[in-house]
Amino acid sequence: MTIDLLLFRTTLVVYALATGLALTDILCSRPAIGRHSRILLWSGFSLHCLVLVNRYLATGFLPLSSLHESLSFYAWAIIGTFLLFHMRYRLAVLGAFITPLALVLMILGSTVPMASVPLNPSLQSWWLPVHVGLAFLGDAVFALAAVAGGLYLLQERMLKKKKVSSLFYRLPSLQTLDNLNHRCLSIGFPLMTLGIITGAIWANRAWGAYWSWDPKETWALITWFLYAALLHGRLAIGWRGRKAAILAILGFACLLFTFLGVNMLLSGLHSYATFGTP
Amino acid sequence: MNFLVIGLSYKTAPVELRERLSFTSGDPGAVLRAITALPGVTEGMILSTCNRVEVYAASQDPAVGSIRLQRFLAEHHQLDVAQLKPYLYIHSGRDAIRHLFRVASSLDSMILGEPQVLGQLKEAYNQAESSCTAGPVFNRLLPRAFAAAKRVRNETAIAQHAVSVSYAAVELARKIFGDLAGKTVMIVGAGKMCELAARHLTGQHIAEVLVTNRTLSRAQDLAKKFGGRPVPFPEFPLFLHQADIVLTSTAAGGVLLTRAQLEQIIRQRKNRPMFLIDIAVPRNIDPEANNIDNVYLYDIDDLNGVIETNLRERRKAAKKAEEIIDQEIIRFYGWLRSLEATPMIVALRQQTEAIRSQETAKTLGGLQHLTAADRRAIEALTRSIVNKMLHPPITALKRIGDDITGEIYLEAVRRLFDLKSDSQQTKPDPLDEGVDSTQDITS
């Protein structure tokens, strides 16, 4: 087993353990276990950083070219974002919902070919890390927004139905979840916008056109419009709570399709990152 | 020395009798000293709350002690013992210790997990200490009871979540708004319940309280109480959009707020959430309002439902708490035994060393031809034989703290080696000014 594979698998296992503990914490209300989960998550994240550094050293560019690398990077960005937000806002409970998401991405990542793809010369430039990195960081922040949205809907439903439970008391308040939605949006949206703009500039350099309406670009634009609508609704119309939560979830679904669905179902210029052999 | 408790509580006695027996008036120190003045009673403590009156005592003979305490309890309140007896419970030894631990942990309370009783018990203990009626038994037992209560509180959900209407309202408000600082509360009507809920809410650094009532003077009174602003009753809907939390409890009001009205208000508030608490019967707010986005309407039944769920959770937690109490009792006994084991080990060592040195001296006296080196060798030999032989029993004694059958070992060692318990007096234990009393708390 290569160092690369070993590191990746270990990271996967550590994330799986952290997920298990976080879920136990929530389902059996054992906050002490939750703390262990976070320690594991930090270790998993550090290992994951090593995975990325190791790949970078081996290939000479940021590992973002194959589907495996994209999945792994996205999972890394999600965990990193969560840990950052947790440090700032103490949202331990979110961990039980965000770590499974990252874990699924990692498992997906381990089922596709792991070999790093020799990069097409036309794509070899520092625009690659800038464009893809920005896009994924934005996506990671939106993943958090979607989880917050899901929890908001859950909590709101329990409040309306007047059904309290131990889970109910563990969830953050509606206001906190709504604030999180707002913050994620105001961080994620600029990131995503920059991701698309840098992509367009890079496309012009590499392919000779800013925008070619290939499926990935089209779906990215649709996603961007969804989030733009949400941001507008929040700032101008005073949308909040339920509506904002639903839109954050819809936006995330759209985003996931842009990332994975497009690769599987549609082909286009971005099709280097497919499930088959590259 | 035995630990015992005699008393009555809401479980065994009606409130009239509990009132009659309460020790809240008079000089508590004098009463405590009167208890320890009873023959055979060495320590005394009184826990007197509205739900229970209990006398804790240390006594040489629990049977006699309990009879004297019963008589004291009756005579102190000018009652007849026979009248009192059917309502009393009497525990001694392990049962009394368990009772104390359960009371401290609020497992015996009317409202499971309520926090006051621990404070009352601490106060009772302080009183006993300052009146010099607490001795080695209490000083050992009470800190353990407090520690057990702390463990129960930290490790179970027994004290979590509101079990009163007003606290439940505050807790729900926090689930909606997070922090209540800076929120505005409006109080419509001035019922007792409303006042209580308002008091809990205003304890949360809220920004403003608006008070309205059909009689303006009542509103003004209440507003003054909470540092709020009175609002004339006919105009109160005009102020509603400012309120994040609305409490209604006008008795003869009927429906004061319709769904359509509230829909408009929530639009005016730009969808900022509103928490409506309607504790009036008949209800003041159209129940349909709960279906409006960002409006959360709870009536008295809803709040009671929440409390019922919370109580159920507490009862579930109580099972776990009982297990903790069991563990703490075992730990307590283990600790007591280890206190006993230490002096016993010393006694055992001293006794064998005395025999060894005496016998060696006798033998060496008849062997004058030996060189000094030979003598030292023989001394060393005998010493190492004794040490080797004592090693297993001493190791076992050191471990008995963890063992439920530890008592048997202590007794066996005492008998097998014919140790006198008074041999302990020669080595004072820092933890302990009356070692022999420890041995018997357990009996």
Image: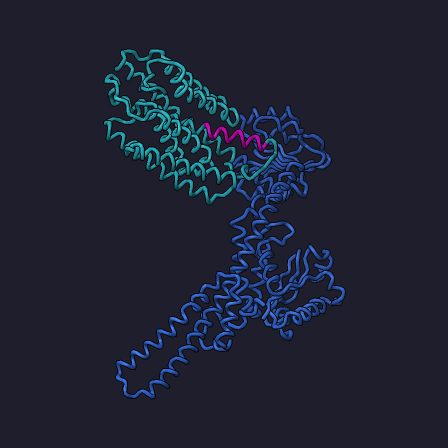
Chain colours: A cyan, B blue
| The C terminus of chain B lies in quadrant | bottom right
Of the pair B410 and A149, the residue shown nearer to us: B410
User: Which residue is at a point 26% across and 15% down the rendered structure image?
Assistant: A206
| The N terminus of chain B lies in quadrant | bottom right
Image coordinates of residue B294 in percent, x first then y, are 56, 28
Q: Is residue A69 above or below residue B205?
A: above
Of the pair B79 and A175, the residue shown nearer to us: B79
Q: Is residue B335 left or right of residue A5?
A: right
The answer to whether one can see residue B198 in this image is: no
Q: In this view, does A257 lie to the left or right of B68?
A: left
Please report the bounds of the magenta region as a residue range: A146-159
Q: Quadrant of residue B185?
A: top right
Of the pair B342 and A60, the residue shown nearer to us: B342
The answer to whether one can see residue B61 in this image is: yes
Q: Is residue A197 above or below residue A155?
A: above
Of the pair A277 and B98, the residue shown nearer to us: A277
Q: Is residue B264 left or right of residue A142?
A: right
User: Which residue is at a point 52% across and 74% down the rendered structure image?
Assistant: B415
Q: Is residue B363 above or below residue A54?
A: below
Helix, strand or loop: magenta stretch: helix
Image coordinates of residue B115 in percent, x first then y, are 58, 52
Image coordinates of residue A11 in percent, x first then y, are 35, 35
